[in-house]
Amino acid sequence: MLKVACVIIIFYAFLYHSEALPSDLCRIRPKDKHCLIEYMARNRWSHQIRVFKRFREVNPDLIPKRMTENQAHTIAVPVEEIEKLPELKENPFKRRICQVFSHDGSGNLTFEDFLDMMSVFSEAAPRDIKAWYAFRIYDLDDDMYIGREDLLEATRLLTKGELHAQEREEIVASVLDEADVDGDGRLSFMDFEHVVVRAPDFLSTFHIRV
């Protein structure tokens, strides 16, 4: 049977960027997105300027140099262009990441969506918030659980299809054996968070430098 190390790899090996900061910033319930927005660097002017510069670089013909408040949540960059960002282009979950942060689930990102994404991946975001969005990324069918099919698809993406079906099944069985605390055959957010707590490098891997 695979041990906890394999479980941790399956949960965050797809994120490659580093530079960890202390994780004791605060504890915020995952659903309190407005608390996140008020707390994090999202509302720091310098952070917004840097994020906007990155956003406009994706498509300078579409994004005006100065955006109105209305344009910030109405002009959307196509997901295919967002996926070309250096931080995402090699990530097997790049499409799913964009879908999670897109306000309508399409993957197309407005500046508000992009700012949310960069804030969650910033070094200022608390572990709780990072864990919540990592959970959502792996919850591929959006049913609020990471089920067997979610794990099979995640394993396929992470291994670039190089494993046989039986090998993927064995990995998924091992992940559930290690992480499914209540034994219902799927991972709730609490199950997932329990794994993240045991992953000391989680904060440093779930990070994009702006």
Image (cartoon, helix red, strand yellow):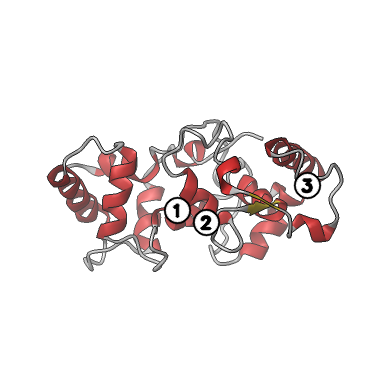
Where residue 45 appears, x then y in whole percent? 82, 45
- Left or right, 24 with respect to 156, comes to right
Residue at label 1? 137
For the residue pair 110 and 16, the one nearer the viewer reads as 110
Density class for disc 3 (Cα within 10 Å; few <14, some 14-19, many ≥20) is: few
Name the disc covering residue 44, or none. 3
- Relative to 186, does residue 114 appear above or below in the rendering? above
Where residue 101 appears, x then y in whole percent? 57, 55
* Identity of the residue drawn at 60% across and 66% down: 32
- The residue sitting at the front extreme is 61
Disc 1 residue type (three-letter):
Ile
Disc 3 residue type (three-letter):
Arg
Closer to the chain start, of discs 2 and 1, is: 2
Q: How many marks?
A: 3
Q: Quadrant of the C terminus?
A: top right
Closer to the chain start, of discs 3 and 2, is: 3
- Of the residues tagged 3 and 1, which is closer to the observer? 1
- Left or right, 155 with respect to 54, comes to left
- Relative to 77, does residue 105 appear above or below in the rendering? below
